[in-house]
Image (cartoon, rainbow, N blue to C red):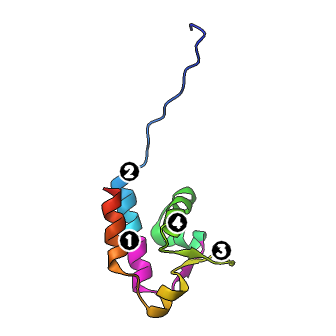
Amino acid sequence: MDGTTRLLVRPDRRNAASRAQLLHRIRAEFREMPCLRLTCGQAQRLFGVRPDVCERVFAALVEEGTLTCGPDARYGLPADLAWRGHLPAQADERHTAKAS
């Protein structure tokens, strides 16, 4: 070695298309069942994802305003959307377009 520091560059293992598909699927489940409230563990089993993937995806859905996380650590639609019984389809289309 010549004494310089080398940075280890790891390739991004995330697949943007599969992530967008998973986000779409989760939004659709909550849109179909507006009163659905899940813990991360329940969501992992329902959607068949690893804990780290579930945490990242739910964090993204909370950040975009699609889901909220209550004091009981359950994720669900914000109260106003759940009460109305739907998640606007445009929200899913808007976020899918952003991922492209």
Compared with residue 7, is residue 42 higher up or lower down, i.e. above or below?
Answer: below
Q: Is residue 16 left or right of 48 when viewed as pictured?
A: left
Tell me the mark number nearer the camera, choosing from 4 and 2: 4
Q: Which residues are magenta?
A: 26-39
Marks 4 and 2 sit apart, C-alpha to C-alpha, by 20 Å
Q: Which numbered dot is residue 63?
A: 4
Q: Which mark is residue 73?
A: 3
Q: Residue drawn at (53%, 59%), measured in percent from left and top?
A: 56
Mark earlier in primary sequence (3, 2): 2
Inspect the image, locate mark 4, and give the three-letter code of the amino acid beneath it.
Glu
> In this rendering, does residue 40 appear at all?
yes
Mark 4 falls on what kind of element? helix
**3 or 4: tag closer to the N-terminus:** 4
Q: Residue furthest top?
A: 2
The answer to whether residue 35 shows anywhere in this view is no
Q: CA distance from mark 1 to mark 4?
A: 17 Å
Residue at the image position 49 percent from the left and 62 percent from the top: 49
Asked if the stretch drawn in magenta spans residue 91, the answer is: no
Residue occupied by mark 2: 15
Coordinates of residue 15 in the picture (x, y in percent): 38, 50
Q: Which quarter of the image is occupied by the C terminus?
A: bottom left
Task: Say which of 2 and 29 sits in front.
Answer: 2
